[in-house]
Amino acid sequence: MSATTHTDRLCLSCLDDLPRELFIGGKWSPANDHRQLASLRPSTGDTLATVAHADATDVARAVAAAGAAGRPGSRWHRMSPAARSRLLHRVGDLILAHADRLALLDCLDNGKPLRVARAGDVPAAAAVFHYMAGWPGRLNGENVSIFTGNPERHLAMTVPEPVGVVAAIIPWNFPLYMAAAKVAPALAAGCTVVLKPAEQTPLSALLLAQLAQEAGLPPGVLNVVTGDAATGAALAAQPGVDKVTFTGSTEVGRSIVRAAAVDFRRVTLELGGKSPNIVFGDADLPQAMDGAAHAIFYNQGETCVAGSRLYVQRQVFDEVVAGIRERAAAIRVGDGLDRDTDMGPLISAEHRARVMSYLHSARAGGAQVTGGHAPDSPGFFCTPAVVTGADPQAPVVREEIFGPVLVAQPFDTAEEAVALANDSPYGLAAGVFTRDLGLAQQVGRRLRAGTVWVNSWHVLDPALPFGGMRGSGWGREMGRAGVDAFLETKTLVNDLGTRPWGTASAPR
Ligand code: NAD
């Protein structure tokens, strides 16, 4: 056990009064058989908190509560768009009002630097609620002209309807933000939700549930079941779920599609990535070096859009790689509570071992690796790594590592860079650094990626659709597309009759 400092004790007080049970139907209740799940603190390896561990019975209870809360005639179903909008705003406001505590929870539970959580994750989560609050009153259908022989006979229209009960399953890398990204658009569309946070980081979702209740969300509209992979699998397969929205690994995404195929429930998938970043020789090189380092090392490299493959035009390759190596060496790795920390620990001992195994096999294959050390101290720390000279078919180049590991390779022409970038089973994000915006456009249009950043990285906004191509998933979150993902379009055709013109009379 590591020593607990005075600061640690102060910070750990953010756990006082935090609900640790399941939030179902507007009430906190223990898991079936009172099962518990431990969440670790990645910077020490100690147990941070234990929470309820939901099983299939609990999941069924939560899905039934969500179904009842959204039923025709329910309070939620009858609520005006303006009232729904006010509720979403209120949740966003409450997130900001509790920003310090939420940031602390994510810092302790995930390991990320407190100042990053406070300046990034928490305001971003609030912004999603505030942005989505603008949608409920704007979700209109259309009148549609149809021709059936008599142009006055039919009145045809589309009606957007909430898809129903949404199962939202999220990973551990941005615990609060991921919860907001699923819950806010679903509620904006009028759905009800069962949220399953990752087993490694359940805490901020529990506080979010408490804040949603305080905001006045009717019971059962948002339910939170904490648990592990089995809990997630039970939720994805539970009858009564109309849509699964999942963020996580490509492998689990595949199993969710299989479960959904049984009754064709709707699915949105935000999966992994191995995102390419292309630096041309004419780029502002210090900007490109900063951008490339930020692309891969932000959030310990534990971001789905991490710019993990770097392609640099040959004449500036050595200079750019040296600049990124310098930046990597200057990154201060440490406890997220420490004000000076730039990069926290990885999420778990297993995950760190997996990251190290990629570096080990890269070295064994003849690649040059700088950084990538695991200090012999408590916690799951790993220093940022830069790899050059790897075999283009090596796992370190092809597979998602989800850690602070950058693989760099030179190219000569724009065509070659695009071919290298697109040679991946993934298609989540990509970047281009150049002063030639015409070239950036051309390259950007040819890249197979859901998002392309030019001379930047990690620029996200709730108004911007986000999602992947190929192995990176199905569908889009955020923006109008992100709300549409929680709606069904109903077509309603009214036959107005065939009364001959001239015989119409006012009803008596
Ligand atoms: P994971 O797929 O193992 O777990 C994600 C969530 O799914 C967790 O809540 C987990 O309990 C649950 N789960 C696990 N097995 C399940 C099953 N069989 N059925 C239903 N639910 C199940 O992923 P992870 O290791 O927690 O997260 C890392 C992965 O997430 C990376 O591959 C990363 O790229 C991806 N990710 C993608 C995005 C995106 O927006 N595209 C964002 C963040 C993370």
Image (cartoon, rainbow, N blue to C red):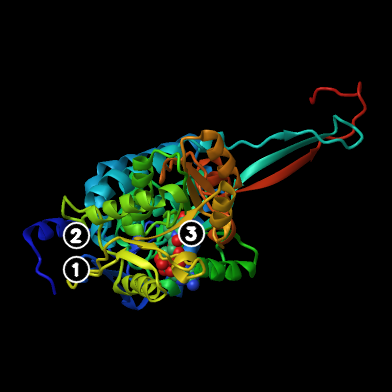
**Marks 3 and 1: in contact by CB < 8 Å?**
no
> Is residue 103 shown to the viewer in this render?
yes
> Which residue is drawn at the image coordinates 54% and 51% (left, top)?
417
Res 153 quadrant in image: top right
Give the amino acid at mark 2.
Asp
- Furthest residue to the top? 502
Q: Earlier in the sequence, mark 3 or mark 2?
A: 3
- Mark 2 lies on residue: 335
Q: Position of residue 128 (x, y in %)?
A: 41, 43
- The picture quadrant where one finds residue 455 is top left
Q: Quadrant of the C terminus?
A: top right
Residue 264 coordinates in the image, percent (x, y): 65, 64
The one nearer the camera, 378 or 260, is 378
Question: Residue at point 41% right, 45% down?
Answer: 457
Q: Is residue 182 left or right of residue 90?
A: right
Q: Which residue is mark 3?
A: 273
For marks 1 and 3, give the CA distance: 29 Å
- Is disc 3 surrounded by few (<14), some (14 to 19) or many (20+) residues within 10 Å? many
Quadrant for residue 406, please give it: bottom left
Name the residue rendered at 65%, 37% in the picture. Answer: 141
Give the Cα distance between marks 3 and 2.
Answer: 27 Å
Residue 391 or residue 307, whichever sits in front? 391
Q: Which residue is mark 1?
A: 44
Query: Could you tell me which quadrant the N terminus lies in?
Result: bottom left
Picture quarter with ligand 1: bottom left
Which residue does the image show at 60% across and 43% down from the upper left?
445
Tell me the amino acid under the disc marked 1: Thr
